[in-house]
Amino acid sequence: MRIEKLVSKLSTSLTLLAFIGTFTAAHAQNAPAPSGPIPNARQMEWYHREIIAFIHFGMNTFEGVNEGEGKVSPALFNPTALDCNQWTGVLKKAGIPCAIFVAKHADGFCNWPSYYTNYSVKNSPWKNGQGDIVREFTDACRAAGIKAAVYLGPHDRHDARYGTPLYADYYAGQLSELLRNYGPIWEIWWDGAGADKLTTPMYTRWADTVRKLQPGCVIFGTKNSYQFADCRWVGNESGIAGDPCWSTIDPSSIREESAHINELNKGEIDGTAFIPAEVDVSIRPSWFYHPEEDAKVKTVAELWDLYFNSVGHNSVLLLNFPPDQRGLIPDIDARRADSLRQLINGTFRTNLAAGATIKTQHPRGGKYAAANMVDGLEQTYYATTDAFHTDTITFNLGRAKTFDVLMLQEVIELGHRTTGWSVDYSTNGKTWTPIPEATGKQSIGYKWLVRCKPVTATKVRLRITAGKACPAIHTFGIYRQPY
């Protein structure tokens, strides 16, 4: 009898131990919990664009200014060869998947035949007043597989109702026209110009219109539109995001932007909202086309710098291409954009860490294997156990390889987790040398890129620290620039 009881207890204990073991293994394979503010679906779609084209074209193009007062006659507007398919052809060749067209700038002139004003293309000689550039733009985008977006400037120097409740009605009507009649609009761009006369209730109404008519539309917000923003201004028009550059920020920093340029540029690690930076810059000195700037188009080297300081700093690059008075993007601008794409593709075509043997200190196990960091797949990643917020990850490359670019991506869907990281290299696996350009870094986010002096190594080591949650690394890559 005692033996039967002992066997029964032993059986129960073994069953319990087996259950605990199974539970522990299953728990170890559970996904890490999100930490802090996290992106919404619109923001994740936005991140994957990486580069967006800005297209400034309108009355300013013909007036020869960047900030028109809205006083010149619509008769001045008359492009001789406008072709939106040429625009999208340039962008498609350059690998740019989204474009924001300036439907109305601060001069108030509308690039579509708005019902609400006579100050538009319908009163210009272009196509005898029968043209609609927004229509041609959105049709061309659809044909090319490019996401169409619009800038509808809230500031309006032409309309006498500006800053009054009547203007709120006027703007809401124009916003509805654009969101109802031109298919999917992937982003609406609201700058902060003239914000002193535009109130939060106005923007609340306009944001409600966006969310009702185009739920998937990203809102670029500043000042009084801060509480509706999916992405924020980076604090300059030079194309440079900060280091670090956190996607999190306190919304009050966006509302009071003039006093918080540093926070806009770098974000705030403990910010209460997830609002990443969109980095706007023109390929020319000005936003609108001026023939005297044909010799001042940014070089490929300058565009390469911009790419690393925007896309490579957990942000999205918004690069302006101003069509000329013909209504075409100049050839020099197109060639520079194409060369940038060739440089991007040539650099990141091959991850030299792919196939590496990887050792980590605190693997989570299961489907969160270290090999996920170099498999090139979108949905896989490496994570430590919840108990550890640091890790040292060693990549054995198998043979000596030379590289001068690093890429890190964390699982930003789970929030900012990494707060510190450095990369070292070794030729013998015993002595390690820090890579100066990749030492003492802080943020990663959706993507972080680092250029360094050429390094030849057989092993590379990532030392990483996470703040409030375990690290979750999507990609680690080393690359060689093709020149």
Image: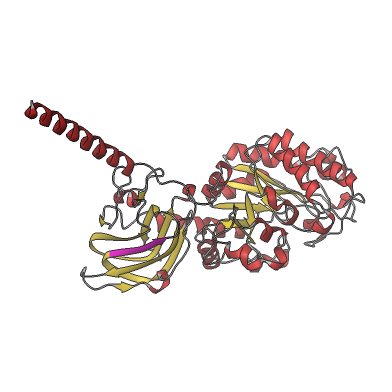
Q: Is residue 346 visible?
A: no
Camera-side residue: 102 or 253?
253
Magenta residue span = 460-466
Left/right placement of residue 143 relative to residue 342 reads right
Which residue is at 44% across, 46% downward? 33
Q: Main secondary structure of the magenta part?
A: strand
Left/right placement of residue 409 relative to residue 359 reads right
Q: Is residue 440 visible?
A: yes
Which residue is at 87% across, 46% downward? 167
Q: Outermost residue toward the right?
A: 160
Residue 438 falls in which quadrant of the image? bottom left
Which residue is at 50% across, 63% downward? 308
List x then y, in percent, for residue 55.
68, 52
List x then y, in percent, for residue 107.
83, 55
Q: Quadrant of the C terminus?
A: bottom left
Q: How many marks?
A: 0
Camera-side residue: 226 or 142?
226
List x then y, in percent, for residue 184.
65, 36
Residue 481 belongs to the span the image colors magenta:
no
